[in-house]
Amino acid sequence: MGIVNVTPDSFSDGGAYVDTAAAVAHALALIDQGAAIVDIGGESTRPGAEPVDEEVECARVVPVIEALRRQSDVFISVDTLKPGVMRAACMAGADMVNDVNALQAPGAIDAVRETGAAACLMHMQGQPRTMQQAPVYGDVVGEVAGFLRQRVASCFEAGIARERLCIDPGFGFGKTLDHNLALLRELDRFTHGDRPVLVGVSRKSMFARLLDTPSMDARIHASVAAAFWAATRQARIIRCHDVAPTVQVLRLAQALGPHETFRTGQ
Ligand code: YH5
């Protein structure tokens, strides 16, 4: 899953057309590098990010999804928390809703059920603006797994087929470096369940903290290694910025087959 951010950056002149064209070109480049899914996001959920209005978010993602749908059969995911954006994106041709809030907003489950989209349910402690201030868990792996089990059950009870759902521990979303490492170390606890697991660690601050450097290159190498670790432990979808090197290690993981570390009875 290649990441396509449609948020204005410091290089943008603010013109919607320019942003759309650049995002579509970026998506096509990621597909060319081997992405099977592109994840289109119009609101930053990075730590400290401020929310944007629904109309603004729709105006960013819908034209990109429409244009990409005309040009490619790729599986299109929309990264959003808002039911209105979910519906508009699916009307425009999105196949999947990637919700860092696990469809907990009022109306989100209905939007996914009624559009027939697939969905990724992610764990987050707190809200993006403040979630990294002081994350606390008793048993991070148990609590995250329990939350995801409950969300899958709620979605199923509300009429979404289980087959449409995948789960995600939510690396960096209200988690310290130690929490993130515990979740990666015990990824088997998620991948041995009945739902496919998505892992998103690409370029995240956890690597800056681990490596004690702000270097983006260092983060990229560690991100690609973490993708390999996750893939050998049966993660099914890797969400990443650097598709070309990630596809290389995923080919190796696939050729090697599963790394069996799962221990039962503990
Ligand atoms: C995810 O894990 N993450 S947006 C901060 C960074 C770098 C990257 C400071 N959406 C996930 O990618 N959806 C995001 O450096 C996601 N899983 C799913 N399912 C945050 C992000 C990032 C944040």
Image: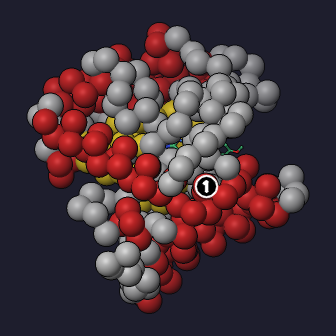
- Residue 55 vertical position relative to residue 231 in the rendered view, above or below: above
The quadrant where residue 116 appears: top left
Could you tell me which residue is drawn at 53 percent across and 60 percent down?
A: 183
Viewed as shown, does residue 1 lie left or right of 166? right
Tell me the kind of residue under disc 1: His
Residue where numbered disc 1 is placed:
179
Q: Is residue 15 visible?
A: yes
Residue 96 at x, y = what percent? 32, 40
The quadrant where residue 217 appears: bottom right
* Local crowd size for mark 1, using a 10 Å CA cut-off: few (<14), some (14–19), many (≥20): many
Tag 1, which secondary structure?
Answer: helix
Q: Is residue 21 visible?
A: no
Ligand 1 - quadrant of the structure image: top right
> Total label count?
1
Could you tell me which residue is drawn at 86 percent across and 59 percent down?
A: 212
Viewed as shown, does residue 227 lie left or right of 110? right
Residue 265 at x, y = what percent? 32, 78
- Foreground of the two, 127 or 139: 139
- Residue 241 vertical position relative to residue 25 in the rendered view, above or below: below
Could you tell me which residue is drawn at 43 percent across and 83 percent down?
A: 261
